[in-house]
């Protein structure tokens, strides 16, 4: 039986393998591709809608329990490149 996590963007439960794990490193949101980085992680669907909802609602800040704002630019760039790889674009 596979582990189930809750997406911080849409608040639905999904299998661990279908979600991205993100962590906070030096006030920066970083994708944990191997899902093994130390520290608290937050889970989100790899879609612009869920990521946008989580950023807009400050869900990453709450889930990761950081005190200040998080820099999300590199996370958003990674998410855009991930979407292009999935869709077959370059």
Image: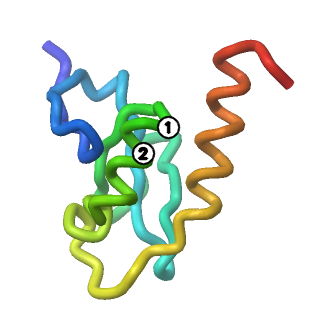
Residue 85 drawn at (x, y percent): 71, 23
Q: Is residue 40 left or right of residue 45?
A: left
- With respect to residue 18, does 22 lie above or below? below
- Closest to the observer, 50 or 14: 50
The residue that label 1 is drawn on is 48
Residue 90 horizontal side relative to residue 84, left or right: right
Q: Position of residue 13 (x, y in %)?
A: 15, 28
Q: Which mark, by number, is residue 75?
A: none
SS for dot 2: helix
At 46% from the left and 32% from the top, the residue drawn is 46
* Callout 1–callout 2 Cβ contact below 8 Å: yes
Question: Is residue 19 something that shows in the picture?
Answer: yes
Picture quarter with the N terminus: top left
Is 88 left or right of 57, judged from the image as shown? right
Q: Is residue 40 visible?
A: no
Query: What residue lies at 35% left-to-right and 23% top-to-bottom?
Result: 17
Q: Residue at x 76, y 13 (%)?
A: 88
| Inter-mark Cα distance, 1 to 2 | 5 Å
Identify which residue, 64 or 76, lies in the foreground. Answer: 76
Number of numbered discs overlaid on the protein picture: 2
Q: In the picture shown, does residue 82 fall above or below 17?
A: below
Q: Residue furthest bottom?
A: 68
Q: Quadrant of residue 87?
A: top right
The kind of secondary structure element at disc 1 is helix
Query: Would you identify the image quadrant in which residue 59 lies?
Result: bottom left
Image quarter (top left, top right, bottom left or bottom right) of the C terminus: top right
Q: Which residue is mark 2?
A: 51
Q: How is the image coloured?
A: rainbow
């Amino acid at each position: 039986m596979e582990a189930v996590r809750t997406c911080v963007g849409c608040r639905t439960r999904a299998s661990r393998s279908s979600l991205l794990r993100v962590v906070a490193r030096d006030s920066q949101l970083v994708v944990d591709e191997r899902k093994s980085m130390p520290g608290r992680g937050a889970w989100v669907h790899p879609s612009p809608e869920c990521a946008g909802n989580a950023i807009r609602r400050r869900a990453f800040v709450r889930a990761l329990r950081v005190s200040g704002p998080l820099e999300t630019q590199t996370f958003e760039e990674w998410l855009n490149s991930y979407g292009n790889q999935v869709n077959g674009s370059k």
